[in-house]
Image (spheres, rainbow, N blue to C red):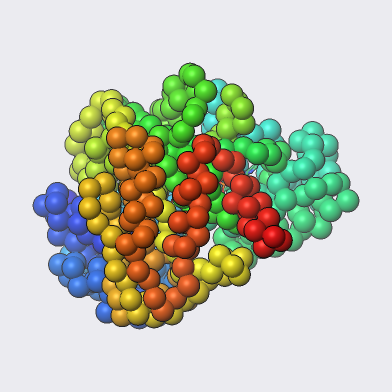
């Protein structure tokens, strides 16, 4: 491996370019119309135009990405997250073109990228899964399955992601209609109308385990992250380690994640996601890719997870057999969204963008003042990651860093984060906590 095509944009594109350079590889950026002038394109060794601004014409266009790799002389492709990252057919085409896909083999993505199949794998591996159904077949299947699962429940698209493709159902009366809508929506959005039912676990925490697996039979974990602060089932704040876990729970969850990864022959970096209620935990899905919130795990283990991905892709062994946990870290997603308007996306020009710094402060962003936050892609402007010897120190550094951050030109989540940090000091929250808080705030 010598030259890596970075098939992504924004902060993760820059993160990947930096990791390539540190490991001694060249990095090629692949960009859309909207991203021509971007910072990551400038910092790459070479850049190839993919197509128009809509993702379907550029970052989601497998033909264009493969052509870009060939024309730029790249011998590997890093898909980042989102877009083509969990597309097994794409991973297969990359391999068939004689290129290295920096991620798991296509067969593994097939098993774990699809939620319904992944649930089956977890059950086979003896990992507890949320009570739920197999993929629904005929029209009558939903009623029978729902009687088993019980209400309230969720209809989930097997190919869903990014918080999309999940619909709650409170009672039997709504079921048929929600299932029909969910099917149609999943077929249109993800190109796969497969849906299944899952019991709604109330007041649960979202806790996920970072795993790493190489070609030499080493499968290990880099501890867990708590990603319970969410809106619309998408994460807004993540931390590592998960605060206040019951004794033995960390060991049980990390062990389950490693067991499942071994069971499916996992390779490269991945994340096994769980819901935790009391002292019980349930598998929900696996993300077969680098995760947005990977930096918090880097802060508490000292690992460079993208560097590990590159090592694994080259056939080298992991740099550690067992990661060690030190301190605590928190990541705040600074999105161009208006929290007062139900987190409505607020694209526009970033007229001012002054970044914080100092010990224990890291900012991952692909943007600079004067850049446009484009309406074509997700609304993340930056990730503010802070760490310290203790959780209290990490949270306090995050408060300080937010006070230094200046964003003008677009509405952002920065101000909300400042409020939330104080409240989070009290301890762990559940996945509906933020939405309930926002309703209470707008009522009072
Ligand atoms: P993470 O699990 O790393 O926290 P997110 O859920 O925030 O990731 O998603 C990261 C990005 O990937 C978002 O832009 C999201 O919309 C996108 N994404 C994730 N899964 C899918 C999917 N199955 N289809 C399309 N986009 C996805
Ligand atoms: P995605 O692929 O969009 O990330 P997930 O299955 O990981 O989908 O679920 C996203 C979020 O939705 C979870 O973090 C959690 O907040 C909520 N969720 C998912 N499944 C359940 C469930 N069975 N009960 C309660 N909440 C759930
Ligand atoms: Mg998820």
Q: Residue at 38% of width from left, 32% of height from top?
A: 223
Q: Is residue 440 left or right of residue 44?
A: right
Q: Is residue 139 visible?
A: yes
Q: Residue 2 location, x and y as percent?
A: 14, 54
Name the one closer to the observer, 96 or 172.
Answer: 172
Identity of the residue furthest to the left in this view? 24
Identity of the residue furthest to the right in this view? 173
In the rendered image, which quarter is residue 182 located in? Answer: bottom right
Q: Residue at 48% of width from left, 72% of height from top?
A: 411
Q: Residue at 70% of width from left, 46% of height from top?
A: 154
Name the one closer to the observer, 209 or 310.
Answer: 209
The quarter of the image holding the C terminus is bottom right
Q: Is residue 151 left or right of residue 371?
A: right
Q: Residue 417 location, x and y as percent?
A: 47, 56
Q: Residue 58 location, x and y as percent?
A: 39, 72
Q: Is residue 51 visible?
A: no
The count of marks equals: 0
Q: Is residue 304 left or right of residue 234?
A: left
Q: Residue 37 location, x and y as percent?
A: 27, 79
Q: Residue at 83% of width from left, 37% of height from top?
A: 147
Q: Is residue 358 above or below residue 7?
A: above
Identity of the residue furthest to the top in this view? 248
In the rendered image, which quarter is residue 183 located in? Answer: bottom right
Q: Is residue 115 left or right of residue 359?
A: right
């Amino acid at each position: 491996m010598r030259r890596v095509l970075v098939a992504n944009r924004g902060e993760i594109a820059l993160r990947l370019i930096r990791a390539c350079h540190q490991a001694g590889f060249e990095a090629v950026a692949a960009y859309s119309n909207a991203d021509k002038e971007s910072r990551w394109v400038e910092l790459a060794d070479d850049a190839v135009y993919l197509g128009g601004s809509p993702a379907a014409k550029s970052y989601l266009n497998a033909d264009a990405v493969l052509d870009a790799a060939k024309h730029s002389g790249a011998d590997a492709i890093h898909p980042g997250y989102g877009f083509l990252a969990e597309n097994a057919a794409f991973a297969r085409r990359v391999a068939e073109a004689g290129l290295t896909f920096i991620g798991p083999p296509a067969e593994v993505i097939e098993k774990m990228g699809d939620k319904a199949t992944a649930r089956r794998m977890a059950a086979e591996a003896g990992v507890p899964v949320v009570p739920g159904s197999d993929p629904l077949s005929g029209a009558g299947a939903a009623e029978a399955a729902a009687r088993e699962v019980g209400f309230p429940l969720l209809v989930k698209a097997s190919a869903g992601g990014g918080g999309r493709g999940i619909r709650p159902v409170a009672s039997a009366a709504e079921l048929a209609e929600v299932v029909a809508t969910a099917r149609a929506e999943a077929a249109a959005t993800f190109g796969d109308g497969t849906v299944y039912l899952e019991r709604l676990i109330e007041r649960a925490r979202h806790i996920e385990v970072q795993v790493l697996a190489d070609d030499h039979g080493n499968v290990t974990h880099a501890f867990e992250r708590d990603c319970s602060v969410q809106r619309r089932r998408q994460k807004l704040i993540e931390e590592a380690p998960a605060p206040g876990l019951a004794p033995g729970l960390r060991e049980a969850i990390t062990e389950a994640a490693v067991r499942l990864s071994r069971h499916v022959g996992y390779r490269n970096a991945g994340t096994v996601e769980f819901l935790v209620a009391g002292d019980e935990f349930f598998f929900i899905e696996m993300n077969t890719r680098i995760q947005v919130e990977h930096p918090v795990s880097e802060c508490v283990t000292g690992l460079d997870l993208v560097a590990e991905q590159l090592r694994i892709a080259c056939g080298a062994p992991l740099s550690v057999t067992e990661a060690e946990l030190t301190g605590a870290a928190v990541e705040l997603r600074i999105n161009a969204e208006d929290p007062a308007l139900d987190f409505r996306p607020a694209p526009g020009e970033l007229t001012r963008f002054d970044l914080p710094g100092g010990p224990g402060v890291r900012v991952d962003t692909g943007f600079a003042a004067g850049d446009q936050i484009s309406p074509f892609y997700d609304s993340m402007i930056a990730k503010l990651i802070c760490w310290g010897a203790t959780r209290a120190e990490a949270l306090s550094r995050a408060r300080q860093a937010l006070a230094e951050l200046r964003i003008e030109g677009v509405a952002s989540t920065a101000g909300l984060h400042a409020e939330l940090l104080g409240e989070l000091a009290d301890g762990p929250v559940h996945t509906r906590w933020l939405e309930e808080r926002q309703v209470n705030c707008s009522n009072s």
